[in-house]
Image (cartoon, rainbow, N blue to C red):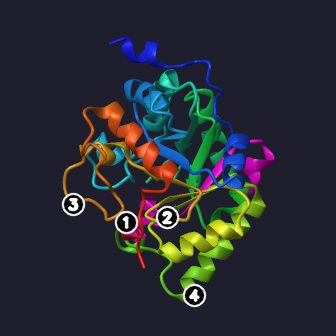
Amino acid sequence: MYTHLELRDSARVPVSLSTLDKMKREREKIACLTCYDASFAVLLDIADVDVILVGDSLGMVIQGHDTTVPVTMDDIVYHCRAVSRGVHRPFLMADLPFMSYPSKERALENSVRLMQEGGAEMVKLESGAGQIEIVEFLAKHDIAVCAHLGLKPQSVHKTGGFRVQGRGEQAARRMLESAKALEAAGADIILLECIPNELGAEITAALEVPVIGIGAGPATDGQILVLYDILDITSGRKPRFVRNFMEGAGNNLEAARAYVRAVRDGSYPGREHGFT
Ligand code: KIV
């Protein structure tokens, strides 16, 4: 049970926002995964993952809901606290769940909870033009912010399901402008979910901050996947951008290492994992 802790090399310098900015400048790909507990956090640390997200996807993969909507602040704080105990090198990001940021004041209050009670180093919120003021407010209070654009799972009941976003000239322009405005408002990372490959490349080239993609094509500065998807634990239909890294791996650690290697050497994702 303790062998993983012994394997962890605590001499490695923890990843910070400056590390991620430098990786973007030097065109080194950033490998990110979701995580929800301490044991997997230790394992992902050993696998050399750069960023760990305590995502509200826990509502689906841990709690068994159909969407992320039922996830509460208490749920994220609980899982984040567990993950933070296992993490040494990776930068730790946590999701602000559904309706935890309806105003800038509530966003600040809940971000403070994620950082002080959960141990998060950055908060992520599903964003668009409507969240610019919130991002600005959090940035003004020195909170590291990741703005999530494209498919926004917290909005599925409004948008009509888990669908590719940003298709067509007008929608693509709108997303590019939102990404630029969120960067200008102080977002430190932009995360793009399920958008066409070309738009992923265009937004990545237009921004100075790192851009992390999930189903956003091979050109983004980094990639993120849901941990249980790469470990082939998730049941049901898999999105096109998911690759099963257990194939050819003897155990979970080898699979996580294979994922990090594939992101870093550019062999994952291929164009076929993305959308047109
Ligand atoms: O909650 C989550 O896992 C996410 C990823 C899909 C990026 O937001």
Camera-nearest residue between 93 and 198: 198
Tell me the distance, in whole angstroms, between the alpha carbons under discs 2 and 1.
Answer: 8 Å
Q: Which residue is mark 2?
A: 218
The residue carrying pointer 3 sits among few (fewer than 14), some (14 to 19) or many (20 or more) residues within 10 Å by Cα, namely: few
Question: Count of labels shown?
Answer: 4
In which image quadrant can residue 59 be found? Answer: top left
Q: What are the residue bounds of the magenta stretch? A: 136-158
Relative to 165, does residue 74 appear above or below in the rendering? above
User: What amino acid type is highlighted by mark number 1?
Assistant: His
Q: Contact (CB < 8 A) between labels 1 and 3?
A: no
Depth check, mark 1 against mark 3: the one in front is 1
Q: From the top left corner, tell me how far across and down residue 119 is, in percent.
A: 58, 28
- Please give the residue where the numbered disc 4 appears in the rendered image: 170
Report the residue at 75% width, 52% height from top. Answer: 137
Give residue 78's quadrant in the image: top left
Give the SS element for disc 1. Answer: helix
The first of marks 1 and 3 along the sequence is: 3
Q: Residues within 10 Å of mark 4 (few under 14, many from 20)?
A: few
